[in-house]
Each structure stands twice: as C-alpha cells, then as structure tokens.
Image: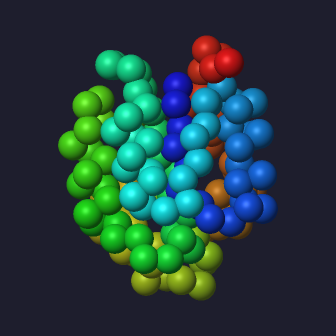
Amino acid sequence: MQALLLTNNLLDRSRITPTAQHAGLCVSVAADEDTLIRLATAGFEEGQAWIVLIDLTVPAIQLQSLLSQLRQLAPPPVAILAFGPHVRRARLAEAREAGCDRVLARSEFFGKMEEILLEYGSRDCE
C-alpha cells in the first residue's frame, strides 16, 4: 500500500518513514499541500490502495479543500490520518470537522505509530 506523508519537519519525516516502510507502506513525502496533491494525482496505479498522513503543523494547509481534492481522486484514499500538538485543540477539531478519518495528538500518534501504521500496511512494498 502507498502512503503519502505531508510534513515539513525533517525529524518527524525521519521517524515516520522507516516505521511506515517497516509496516509495509511505500512512502512519498510532500512538504506542502500542492506537492501532496501532485503526488496523489500522478503516483498511483489504477486500483492501488493508499493512505494520507497529515502533519497539522505544516503552515497554510486548507484542510477542507485538501480533503475534498484527495477524496475526488480515483481511487480515493483508504484513510486520511492527521496529527498535531495537543495544545492546538482548534486545529485538531478542524481536522475532525474537515473529515479526517483519524485525528490524533502528536504524542499519541508517535506513541502508537507502529501499531497505527501496521493497520494499513502490507508486505508488498519494495
């Protein structure tokens, strides 16, 4: 299964990418919303399952618009997960309201990251 990661945090990227790969997810990383949409539009074979991981600290993300664009792609993502600092309650609530399938505080995401990613992974990634 494919995974798209939206983050501009190099430390988070270096933590998430190998864990996702270990879970069987082939990871592509985007640092901004436009790149994420470009990767999602161009990168998938017909019928291939994929998920999206969104770091809510990336500036200027328009969540409602982004999720709408992602869900209109064929095939649409299996799941959209978002994570962000627990103190940014409004941003976490915005992600829920925008329709993210799962919204987690950063500490919860990183604490359960392997378990969460294994839910979506497959061993078909090379």
Left or right, 16 with respect to 35, comes to: right
- Quarter of the picture holding the C terminus: top right
Specify the color scheme: rainbow
Residue 93 placement: quadrant: bottom left
Q: Residue at x 31, y 56 (%)?
A: 67
Q: For this rendering, which residue is in front, 78 or 4?
A: 4
Above or below for 67 versus 17 = below
- Residue 10, position as x, y percentages in the image: 73, 61
Q: Nearer the viewer, residue 94 or 69?
A: 69
Going 26% across and 51% down the picture, which residue do you hit?
69
User: Residue 100, position in %: x, y?
Assistant: 38, 56
For the point 53% across and 83% down, the residue is: 88
User: Percent from the top left, x then y, of residue 26?
Assistant: 61, 30
- Would residue 63 appear left or right of 5 to someone viewing this image? left
User: Would you say 71 lies left or right of 94 here?
Assistant: left
Q: Residue 125: which quarter of the image?
A: top right
Q: Picture coordinates of residue 68 (x, y %)?
A: 24, 54
